[in-house]
Image: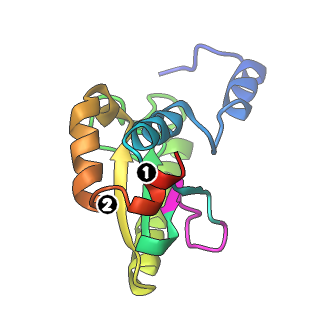
């Protein structure tokens, strides 16, 4: 399939895609904050620079966009244009993600991935995060 955008239009669109503070990431942070959790963001000293980090618990959360990280859902379907570029690019992203999760595991960190498509069901996401994290700590509640 031929791209419907000019190369200049496509370039501008792709340059505007953010890697931090994305809509899905902000949504997960809002869910956590409203539930009483306090956290750190984008720890560059950890493999993959996790989106949300709980240093005292040694737990990290990655919020993945379905397209960019190759999720097996409707939003995660690959591009129909420039398959020679997008196929290897998205596959490399998946390999990098796995490598980062394995490295964090080897360092004693527990990780969870929240997918963009899962954010339609906030209650389910909150339940998953609560199970993963346990309840907010007393020190979290005192900082409110």
| Residue 33 higher or lower than 107, as above or below | above
Point out which mark residue 16 bears. none
Tag 2, which secondary structure?
helix
Give the magenta part as a residue range: 44-53
Residue 16 appears anywhere in the view? yes
Residue at figure coordinates x 43%, y 40% from the top left: 28
Identify which residue, 106 or 53, lies in the foreground. 53
How many dots with numbers?
Answer: 2
Q: Disc 2 designates what residue?
A: 133
Sequence-wise, the earlier of marks 2 and 1 is: 1
Question: How far across and how far down the image is residue 91, in percent?
Answer: 44, 55
Residue that numbered label 1 is attached to: 37
Give the mark toward the camera: 2 or 1: 1
114 lies above or below 80: below
Q: Nearer the viewer, residue 70 or 63?
A: 63
Q: Are marks 2 and 1 in contact (CB under 8 Å)?
A: yes
Residue at point 39% right, 60% down?
Answer: 138
Q: Nearer the viewer, residue 118 or 68?
A: 118
């Amino acid at each position: 399939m031929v791209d419907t955008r000019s190369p200049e239009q496509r370039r501008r669109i792709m340059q505007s895609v953010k890697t931090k503070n994305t809509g899905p990431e902000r949504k997960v942070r809002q869910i956590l904050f409203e539930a009483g959790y306090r956290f750190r963001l984008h720890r560059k000293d950890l493999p993959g620079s996790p989106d949300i980090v709980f240093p005292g618990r040694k737990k990290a959360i990655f919020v993945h966009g379905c397209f960019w990280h190759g999720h097996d859902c409707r939003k995660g379907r690959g591009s129909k244009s420039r398959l020679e570029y997008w196929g290897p690019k998205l596959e490399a992203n998946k390999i990098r993600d796995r490598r980062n999760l394995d490295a964090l595991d080897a360092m004693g960190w527990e990780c969870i991935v929240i997918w963009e498509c899962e954010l339609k069901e906030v209650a389910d996401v909150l339940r998953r995060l609560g199970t993963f994290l346990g309840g907010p700590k007393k020190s979290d509640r005192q900082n409110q």
